[in-house]
Amino acid sequence: MSIIDEIKKKAHASIKRIVLPEGDEPRTIRAAAKLRDEELAFPILLGDPEKILSTARTCGMDLREITIINPPDSPDFPRYTQLLYELRRGKGMTLENAGTLTADPMYYAVLMVKCGDADGLVSGAAHTTGDMLRPALQIIKTKAGTKLVSSSFLVECPKKDVGQNGLLIFSDCVVVPCPTAEELAHIAVSAADTAHTLCGIEVPKVALLSFSTKGSASHELVTKVRQAAEIAHSLAPDLLLDGELQLDAALAPEVAALKAKDSPVAGAANVLIFPDLQAGNIGYKLVQRLAGAEAFAVLQGLAKPCNDLSRGCSVEDIVNTVSITAVQAQA
Ligand SMILES: CC(C)(COP(=O)(O)OP(=O)(O)OC[C@H]1O[C@@H](n2cnc3c(N)ncnc32)[C@H](O)[C@@H]1OP(=O)(O)O)[C@@H](O)C(=O)NCCC(=O)NCCS
């Protein structure tokens, strides 16, 4: 079974409430109906109900059993406004600003998740990553034991002799543009957690990637990756992890035997940590475009699950991301 089918099966087993702040966006409306029909989530659409229902009619969709909330008209609006004000007044927020922001579906959705009135959030069909991430970082914050929000891609390669039967975790490809050694260490530990809890990878084997393997090159960028591996070891002493490793040493047993024969992960890595966002983002797109891999994005490190879509997403992409978010909410 593919990773996304496994995730959908899990989502169906314990259905979660997922809020979709872009409620009047046609692909989102189609996805909400599909999620309801396939019993993968209880979708909550935010926005002007008249506009949402009229778009649904144009798309030929019915929205029975789907909750629609217009933030300014909601009985929860004053409570959320007050909460936002309390959380952010130390940063200069006034009650008036808090009211204006709570009327914004993106902030309202984040506040719903914060309050436990929804189990998770998915957006991005019409907004940028930063539009959703900033309120999530400000309001939901990181989960205990984590300092940093980052991302993983679940990458399913047609080549089944890499990773766990072709499944690899790539991190970070979305959030932290230029991580310090300490941030890279947190990304590595979070990605191992994603591999285990979301993807069912029993033994995550984490490789911190570089253009050098175990001192084959000297450069400050290599030193940073090596330091990150040391910090990650101290954060999670039981985790199988190594760095710095080149990609071929991480994945290919015959290269590992030559370049890193004492490594606990070389030649068998299933979690790949890229040294910065440019490498990570380019890396996952390369395997997607050139190797025909499937790639599913997930944010990690937030106290409650929120996930981002690409603005070019399809209805199926939204269904997949909501299913992933629902499974994160189960954990
Ligand atoms: C994540 C991102 C949106 C943060 O935006 P920003 O403008 O730097 O936000 P700020 O620095 O104002 O930080 C906002 C809050 O989030 C916190 N924060 C920022 N990045 C964080 C992270 N990765 N993890 C945890 N907290 C973080 C800050 O500490 C701050 O908290 P505070 O306001 O309570 O003090 C930004 O780093 C970003 O845009 N990343 C790249 C995303 C992107 O374009 N990806 C494209 C790939 S598809």
Image: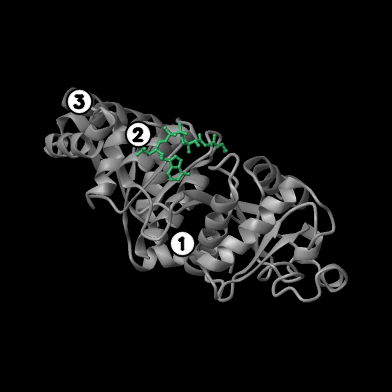
Q: State the CA–CA distance, disc 1 to disc 2.
A: 24 Å
Could you tell me which residue is drawn at 65 percent across and 70 percent down?
164
| Position of residue 329 in the picture relative to residue 76 (left or right) | right
**Horizontal and vertical percent for residue 119?**
30, 54
Mark 3 or mark 1: whose residue is earlier in sequence: 1
Pointer 1 with pointer 2, Cβ within 8 A: no
Q: Quadrant of the C terminus?
A: bottom left
Give the spatial CA distance, label 2 vs label 3. 37 Å
- Mark 1 or mark 2, which has the lower sequence index? 1
Quarter of the image that includes the N terminus:
bottom right
In this figure, which residue is indicated by the disc labeled 2?
A: 56
Q: Nearer the viewer, residue 96 or 161?
A: 96
Residue at the spot 38% in from the left edge and 51% down from the top edge = 142
Of the residues shown, which amino acid type is indicated by label 3? Thr
Q: Which residue is mark 1?
A: 8
Mark 2 lies on a secondary structure that is: helix
Name the kind of residue labelled 1 in the image. Answer: Lys
The x and y percentages for residue 29 are: 38, 38
Of badges 2 and 3, the one in the foreground is: 3
Nearer the observer: mark 1 or 2; the answer is 1
Classify residue 93 by image quadrant.
top left
Q: Is residue 43 above or below residue 252?
A: above
Q: How many neighbours does mark 3 have within 10 angstroms: few (below 14), some (14-19), or many (20 or more)?
A: some
**Coloring applied to the structure:** one colour
Q: Which mark is residue 94?
A: 3
- Front one among 241 and 75: 241
